[in-house]
Image (tube, grey):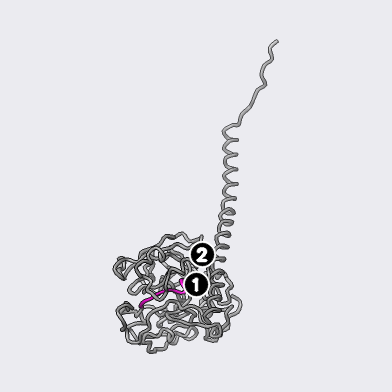
Amino acid sequence: MSRSSPFRRGFTLVELLVVIAIIGVLIGLLLPAVQQAREAARRAQCTNNLKQLGVALHNYHDAHNCFPAGYYSYGTSTGTGPTWAAIDPNTWDAAPGWSWSAMLLPYMDQDGLASRLDTNNPVWTAGYEDLISATLPSFLCPSSSGDREPFAVRDASGSNLSIGGGDVTLGRSHYVASHGQESCWGECGSDVTGTVFTDIYSSATTSITINGDVSRVADGPFYRNSRTRVGEVSDGLSKTIFLGEHSSKLSEKTWVGVIPGAYTHPNFTSPENGEDAAATLVLVHAGPSGGELDITGSPIIHPVNFPTYHVGQMFSEHPGGGNVGMGDGSVRFISENIDLITFAELSSINEGEITEGF
């Protein structure tokens, strides 16, 4: 007798479609969790980068009895000086140009690079090309979707800027230093008198004479030729923003320094966004500045990710806000929905503001 094979029943089309649908739902539920885990790791790395910078700032202070300048520039009260200084006739920015972050290299395990850069020479000194275009991972946020490669410095028109006989290509950074509420970019040169110091509570403005001395304007820890000391941060180191993020998705920033005649250009357009002077290669501010008032007469303040998208503001691609480095070396995550006045209060060093609960 022959035995017949048992009948084997396969999936029907309906059953197969149901299984596929279930798998799709499970993947849909899993992907956000995976993305959140990856972002958490990226944000942790960004936090660690800012902590390293904060420690380096304090090590620099221990060695020099002050924090590094926002950037170093030949000092002039008339806009004139020796030819080697290459003084910008508009901003009075000049050689050598090295930034706060370049000065931290010896305190960040970058002694080899630092030893080859004489910061008494201009940034654009012949022979420094490979050094100043170096990509340093500690200055890059993993969440930034913008470029990570070195970039060519541009002039006001957007063309490559030529200085010292050629173009200048700088290593990129996603971290910037705080100039405070007020800014002093293009207006701190030949325009020696301007409207500055907008009161964040009353919107009242004050006009002063600048004569190239940015300390008469800046109310934050870092500005041109600054020498801020711990004792001068009377608002409290733990309640004063020193550093923050600026993703290259918005505009180019560098760890190297400021080039006279350079401009920072936005990488996307918005109603309030345009190019700004060279200081914004390494510095940002919170606003208001120069009598900036909106149509209601209120001061214009732009915290992290504020939709003005100025090249001179903080900008992060972490969901909901961005990391900032405080004056005591700690790192805080600032919501993009933070109260505007609170953010402005956190940005000045010695205006007597009391900030709680941020």
Please state the horizontal and vertical placement of residue 29, each as a whole percent of the image.
59, 50
Amino acid type for the residue under numbered disc 1: Leu
Tell me which numbered mark, 2 or 1, is placed earlier along the sequence: 1
Amino acid type for the residue under numbered disc 2: Ser
Dot 2 and dot 1 residues touching (CB under 8 Å): no
**Residue nearest the viewer, comparing 111 with 74:** 111
- Residue at image point 36% right, 68% down: 265
Q: Is 161 within the magenta?
A: no
- Residue at image point 55% right, 86% down: 352
Please state the horizontal and vertical placement of residue 227, each as a whole percent of the image.
48, 82
Question: Image quadrant for the C terminus?
Answer: bottom right
- Residue at image point 61% right, 29% down: 10
Start and end of the magenta stretch? 94-104
Residue 48 visible in this rendered orientation of the protein: yes
Q: Is 100 within the magenta?
A: yes
Q: Which residue is mark 2?
A: 138
Q: Is residue 166 above or below residue 287?
A: above
Few, some or many residues within 10 Å of mark 2 (<14, 14–19, 20+): some
**Residue nearest the viewer, comparing 293 with 194:** 194
Image-quadrant location for residue 237: bottom right
Q: How many labels were placed on the picture?
A: 2
Residue 274 visible in this rendered orientation of the protein: no
Residue most toward the top? 1
Q: Which residue is mark 1?
A: 104
Image-quadrant location for residue 291: bottom left
